[in-house]
Amino acid sequence: MTDADLSPVVPMPTGLCEDPTGEAVALIARMAKGDGSALTDLHGMWSAVLLGTACRMLGDRREAEEVVQDTFVRMWHRSAEYDPHQSPPFVWAFAVLRGYCIDRLRFRHRGKRDSSRVVPIHLHAPPEGSEDPQVMALDDWRRVRAALDQLAPDERSCLELAVFLEYTHSEISEHLGTPLGTVKNRLRRALDKVRNQLSRYEL
């Protein structure tokens, strides 16, 4: 199986970091009331994107599928605790998924190391419990969102694909139907703008 098989270029939902129509928030609210069809609808919206992300992080499609399933189960059980004022729906889902992926990577590492040598893991893992719905402090999210709002739509699309889904330049080019050189220029501009905006804060 090739890397391309494990990391497919998948459609990205409109407004990855936002929920402009309120559809995702409404589905989570229905889930909190025990509406199973809402979970099915949310799975249809996000499962392909989350699977692509998990494949990329874990390098194993079977494990990635299990992680995606665990993510939706966790979201179902925690749906009543979700607060849209704390983080957008996809950011919440992404953090839950990332937490499960990191747990699996840690488990792999523990299985490979021997008792005579402990190798530190540099995963930049979030604090314990970060997969909770309150995944990002409200102030921090507002600062990040303000930085993203400074970007042109084409720059923001490139940056979201690169940061959230870890697409390569070539994959972004293919996904957006944009020349590779243009993608690189947009990413460079977007990163410069975001860095300048966030440099005002201690994030």
Image (cartoon, rainbow, N blue to C red):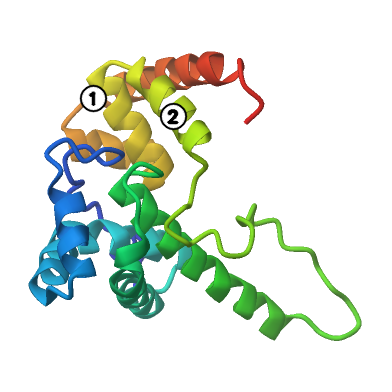
Label 1 or label 2, whichever comes before in sequence order: 2
Quarter holding residue 5? bottom left
Secondary element at tag 1: loop
Residue type marked 2: Arg
**Is there a contact, CB below 8 Å, between mark 1 and mark 2?**
no
Q: Nearer the viewer, mark 1 or mark 2?
A: 2
Instruction: Determine the CA span between mark 1 and mark 2.
Output: 32 Å
Residue 185 lies, in percent from the top left, at 37, 17
Residue 196 relative to residue 13: left or right: right
Residue 137 relative to residue 68: left or right: right
Residue at the image point whose x is 10% and y is 64% from the top = 41
Secondary element at tag 2: helix
Q: Is residue 114 above or below residue 200?
A: below
Residue at the image point whose x is 28% and y is 16% from the top = 152
Residue type marked 1: Pro
159 or 137: nearer the eye? 137
Can you tell which mark lies on residue 48? none
Name the image quarter holding the N terminus: bottom left
Find disc 2 in the rendering and name its residue.
142
Can you tell which mark lies on residue 179? 1
Residue at the image point whose x is 48% and y is 52% from the top = 135
Residue 82 lies, in percent from the top left, at 34, 57
